[in-house]
Image (spheres, rainbow, N blue to C red):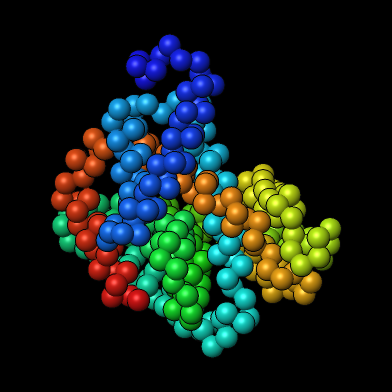
Amino acid sequence: MEALGDIDSNARLLIALGSILLLGLLASFVGKRTFLPRVTLLLLFGVVIGQHGFDVIPSPLADNFDAIAQIALLMVGFLLGGKLTRRSLDGLMWTALGISLVTALVTAILVSLGLMLIGVDVVVAVLLGCIAAATAPAAVLDIVTETGAGGRFKDLLLSIVALDDAWALMLFGIGIAIAFPLYDGSFNNGPFLMTLKHIGGAICLGFLIGVPATYLTGRLKPGKPSMTEALGVVFLCGGVALWFDVSYLIAVMVLGSTIANLAQHHDYPFHAIEGIEDQFMMLFFVLAGASLEVNLLLQIGTIGLAYISLRVLGKLSGA
């Protein structure tokens, strides 16, 4: 940052934002012509310009990574929820439920047992196994969009990814409930009940906001909601979810699914979000790469390599 120290902070921020967006377009161009997806290129670019690289990201941008990440994930969750319609899941619902559940369970069990076999503490192994069940929805959605995949395969894949986070939350709650008696001999079902609250509360919230939004949005301009309407509903749902400490990702997924299934006067209620979602995704992945603790990656050792390998094996064999 010293090289840019004599530049006004607002100028640095605007230069950084413009550079990230333009280089995001370059990453998309390169990704379409190589075997590397855009997500990987954006993460690598973030590492290069981040704190362990040239360190040229202005602090206002780096300090607000959490807010940018939440906005990007809100849009991703809303778009994923919009894919969960009766028409798109016709004949696929039980397949999606089965694959997502078995994949999550097999991954959690395989990672936990594998780590125990190499000497990792039982409590740590169980919790890492539960964490391994989760899937990053933003990366999957970005790659599906980039490749232009379509048809029933895309519908099934995105449905599995959408359901994956609910299973991962439940498994983590169960894992913590198991870890307490293993750690100090005391039984505590509080974490599991809290997890049920996170999921159940999010489902109720998404439905409660989604039902009126279904009938109120898309009236100013018949056929599709405006950008203001779409963002207003998504941000409202996400903010209330954070306020009540429930899963904002699941809440906006249920919101998107509710609107997509109930709206009769919408042509397609998600065009507005798709119009700006890409820009936030670019910022999200670049800042994620910039915040990566590269020095810690070099210290993961046998446990880290075993975790990664077992997780890949669990996801593949489970699916």
Q: Nearer the viewer, residue 294 or 56?
A: 56
Residue 90 at least partly seen: yes
Q: Nearer the viewer, residue 132 or 36?
A: 36
Q: Residue 32: which quarter of the image?
A: bottom left
Q: Horizontal and vertical percent for residue 297? A: 24, 42
**In the image, what residue occupies the spot 33% across and 53% down?**
30
**In the image, what residue occupies the spot 33% across and 75% down?**
318
**In the image, what residue occupies the spot 30% across and 44% down?**
44
Q: Residue 286: which quarter of the image?
A: top left
Q: Residue 168: which quarter of the image?
A: bottom left
Q: Is residue 297 left or right of residue 67?
A: left
Quadrant, the N terminus: top left
Answer above or below: position of 290 versus 142: above
Q: Horizontal and vertical percent for residue 207? A: 71, 64
Q: Horizontal and vertical percent for residue 206? A: 68, 61
Q: Is residue 254 left or right of residue 184?
A: right
**In the image, what residue occupies the spot 27% across and 65% down?**
312
Q: Is residue 59 left or right of residue 311?
A: right
Q: Residue furthest bottom?
A: 91
Q: How many marks?
A: 0
Q: Horizontal and vertical percent for residue 313? A: 25, 68
Q: Is residue 100 left or right of residue 272?
A: left
Residue 207 at least partly seen: no
Quadrant, the C terminus: bottom left
Answer above or below: position of 3 versus 102: above
Q: Nearer the viewer, residue 42 or 198?
A: 42
Q: Nearer the viewer, residue 122 or 40?
A: 40
